[in-house]
Image: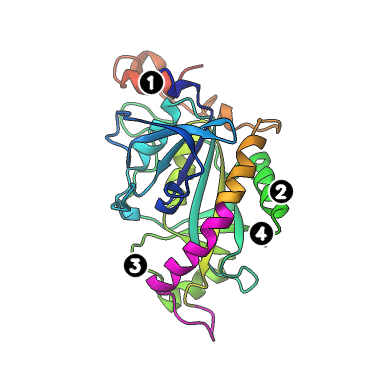
Amino acid sequence: MSVAMSVRIGIIGGSGLYKMGIIDDIEEVTIETPFGNPSDKITLGSIEGVKVAFLPRHGRYHQYPPHKVNYQANIFAMKSCGVKYLVATAAVGSLRKKMKPCDFVIARQLIDRTVFRKNTFFEHDIVAHVEFADPFCQGFSDLAFETVKSTHVDVHDGTYLCMQGPQFSTRAESELYRSWSADVIGMTLAPEAKLAREAQMCLCGILTVTDYDCWFEGEEDVSVSSVIENLKKNDEHLADIIRRFIPKIDGRWTCDCSKALEYAVITNPEYFKDHVDHRIQRILLKK
């Protein structure tokens, strides 16, 4: 754990990122959390000489579907490693013609349509209400946008709609989400964003477009085979982007992400100090 505690940058991504081979000096650690087991062991290593912690959100064999990922344990494990800057990569479907398959999108806003997912650390014996108007760190996201743009890959800012899954959208749902001004659709980023805010991390979402969902006339309906094909095409670009991005993360922007709990905890400390798991107090609530 002492090695892990020095890691300031974390990456949560799909199974494809796990196989890119961009992380050097790898060491795997098992981290226990008050919320159960993370999706996998935490991979510690370095990218371009910078220490990172990586976790495949679906497990290294992609064995956990979106609605069964233990998001609480995943984010808590990253926080336990000392992570302050969290990069979430994810594949998405596009709801806008200009956001083409194999383009990149930086998440700026979020619509959560998931149900029955654990999206808060504060469920028992402690109440907290964090501000969440802007779910992604602006400065961190700006840096991500600039980095992707420098690789000459088409990149956009966008609103991410998180659907329940694991099925893809109906045509009616896809059109409804477009009418809400959502730009891309996925199945994982909403609980990660909410928990990262409670963990007082800076979060950015780097999204890779795999398809046009099922709204776009003239396009084949989204299929698993087309998604996997475009995922493979995106892998090379994503690896290059991550290599460029990680060394630039120095917290030079100004934000309030690290102070999200400053006024959010409502429960009297005299109560929760005797009722709440010491790991939650030490890792999430420490000053």
Residue nearer the viewer, 119 or 158 = 158
Give the spatial CA distance, label 1 vs label 3: 38 Å
Residue 229 seen in the current view: yes
The residue singled out by tag 4 in the image is 155
Left or right of residue 68: residue 111 = right
Find residue 167 and name its label: 3
Q: Residue at x 54, y 64 (%)?
A: 209
Tell me the distance, in whole angstroms, between the alpha carbons under discs 4 and 1.
37 Å
The answer, for residue 268, to whether it is visible in the render is no
Amino acid at the residue labelled 1: Met
Q: Mark 4 or 1, which is nearer the eye?
A: 1
Residue drawn at x 56%, y 53% is: 238
Local secondary structure at mark 4: strand
What residue does disc 1 label? 1
Circle 3 or circle 2, nearest the eye: 2
State the CA–CA distance, disc 3 to disc 2: 33 Å
Is residue 232 within the magenta segment?
yes
| SS for dot 3 | loop
CA separation in Å, label 2 and label 4: 9 Å
Which one is earlier in the sequence, the residue at label 2 or at label 1?
1
Residue 61 vertical position relative to residue 175 in the rendered view, above or below: above
Residue 24 magenta-highlighted = no
Numbered label attached to residue 146? 2
Q: Nearer the viewer, residue 128 or 204?
A: 204
Label 4 – label 3 distance at C-alpha: 27 Å
Amino acid carrying mark 3 in the image: Gln
**Crowd tier of the residue under label 2, counting other residues whose Cα lies within 10 Å: few below 14, some 14–19, many 20 or above:** few
Instruction: Tell me which secondary structure the magenta stretch mostly adopts.
Output: helix
Q: Is residue 106 left or right of residue 20?
A: right
* Disc 4 crowd, CA 10 A, few/some/many (<14, 14-19, 20+): many
Q: Are marks 4 and 3 in contact (CB under 8 Å)?
A: no
Residue range in magenta is: 215-238
